Amino acid sequence: MKPLCLSLLIPAVLFAGATVYNAPAGVEQDKLFQVKVAGQPSFVYSLPVGGMTYFSYTSFARRADIEITVARPVETVAIRPTSYGIRPVINGNVITFRLDRTAQISVEINGDIKHPLLLFANPPESAPPKPGPSGIHYFGAGQVHNVGRITVTSGQLVYIAGGAIVRGSIFMDQARGVHILGRGVLDGSLYKKGESRMIEVNRSSDVDIEGIIVTNSKHWTVPITASDKVTLHNVKLVSDNDWDDGVDVVGSTNVTVDQCFIRTKDDCVAVKAGVQYFTKFNAQRDVSNVVIKRSVLWNGAWGNGLEIGFETRAASIRGVRFLDNDLIHVEGPEGTFSIHNGDRAVISDVIYDNCRVEDSKGLLVDFKILKSRYSKDAERGQIRNIVFRRIRVDQAEMPSILQGFDATHQVGGVVFEDVKTGGRKWTSLADAGIKATHTENVSFK
């Protein structure tokens, strides 16, 4: 976020229906968009991926009229996810619509996805903490806090108020009962490429992350390694840098990502085991009970949308659920739904249910058992018992691959139930455009 001579002295403005947050003085404002929420100006941040603004409803009776003024002619407007059913009205260069729900949307003008407006409508905060008590890392509104790494221990809380920017990262190891919450921004712009992860959860349990926005990640954004009972809710990850995976679940159990927005250059979500790039402890633990649900995903130039792999150094990765998600853009040549089993794990019991794909440039389904540049195990693994159910893809034709390694390391037991591309239901491998090798028991319903 670049400096600009801009003086905003009041950190937040409350009005009927919503709370808008003013940015700290000196923060660059986006030049393309001006936004009003229920008649009040809402600051638009200038980010490498476009403009960004956010507000919170003041009560659970959610309703707010949105007005966007664009500094260029407006011919068309796409508001994604389209499943929200938002119908904008265009009057010259002014766009209006009503929100009556919490929402994480991309407003795209004249088909331009290089500079959209990202708008985040949050639920009201419930009893936000106050500064002062021991064990609370409190970052107040209306300020830029240049803090670098924040190390948290068991029982501690990190609060980033709406209208605050924290330049730094959050780290924990062997911690229990940690809470990270607020409406403000955790910003990684002070780091060099590969220097730090943004919220690093190592060998920890009972960790809740809620409400905040994380921008400009220079490495994996939220890696969860050898941990248990970790929840992300209403977290927004916005980045466009090398290696900036959104959420990486590594050798962990009981992880839930719910109602989050992830816009990254690399993988949006990746489930792995045995990765030790940044850690010195053993992360070759089995993975189970991972749920990614009700989230909005945008994968940029690299990586995959929803990924399992490539590093799969454990006995099993099972019980992974991708439920009710919107993949609004998958820009790169890789996969939208991908399993890349590069090591010994048996990957099984994976469900993709009620997911919608609006725009994807690569493979739709990309399952491979392989020896890759990331592989370390001598033995290859398995991919078994995978279900696709109620999948809707806007595009009419997209290639897919089911590729086992050999006759004893196969992709097996894959069910495609009510999967449609361009409104046409899949009925066979040929009909779906799937190239299959070393594959068995693939069925269509």
Image (spheres, rainbow, N blue to C red):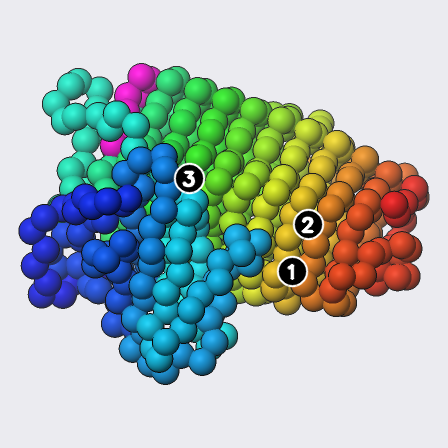
Q: Mark 3, residues whose alpha carbon is within 10 Å: few (<14), some, or many (≥20)? A: many
- Say which residue label 1 marks: 334
Real-space CA distance between mark 3 and mark 1, rounded to the nearest whole angstrom: 27 Å
Q: Mark 1 is on which residue type?
A: Glu
Where residue 398 is drawn, which disc sits there?
Answer: none
Residue assigned mark 2: 338
Residue in view at x 88 percent, y 47 percent:
444
Callout 2 secondary element: strand
> In the visual, does 129 lie left or right of 176?
left
- Magenta span: 153-159
Picture coordinates of residue 123, whole percent (x, y): 36, 38
Whether tag 1 and tag 2 are in contact, CB under 8 A, the answer is yes
The reply to whether residue 151 is in sight is no
Q: Of 352 and 269, which appears nearest the observer?
A: 352
Disc 3 is placed on an element classified as loop
Residue 53: image quadrant is bottom left
Q: Amino acid at mark 3?
A: Asn
Using the rendered view, name the quadrant where residue 364 is placed. Answer: bottom right
Disc 1 versus disc 2: distance between alpha carbons? Answer: 8 Å
Image coordinates for residue 296, horizontal then vertical, percent: 51, 49
At 24% from the left edge and 37% from the top edge, which residue is drawn?
160
Q: Position of residue 142 (x, y in %)?
A: 13, 46
Whole-Å distance between the Cαs marked 2 and 3?
24 Å
- Give the number of the mark in front: 3 or 1: 3
Q: Which residue is mark 3?
A: 234
| Residue 185: image location, x then y, percent | 28, 46
The three-letter amino acid code for the residue at tag 2 is: Ser
Query: For the residue labelled by badge 1, is the local secondary structure a helix, a strand or a loop?
Result: loop
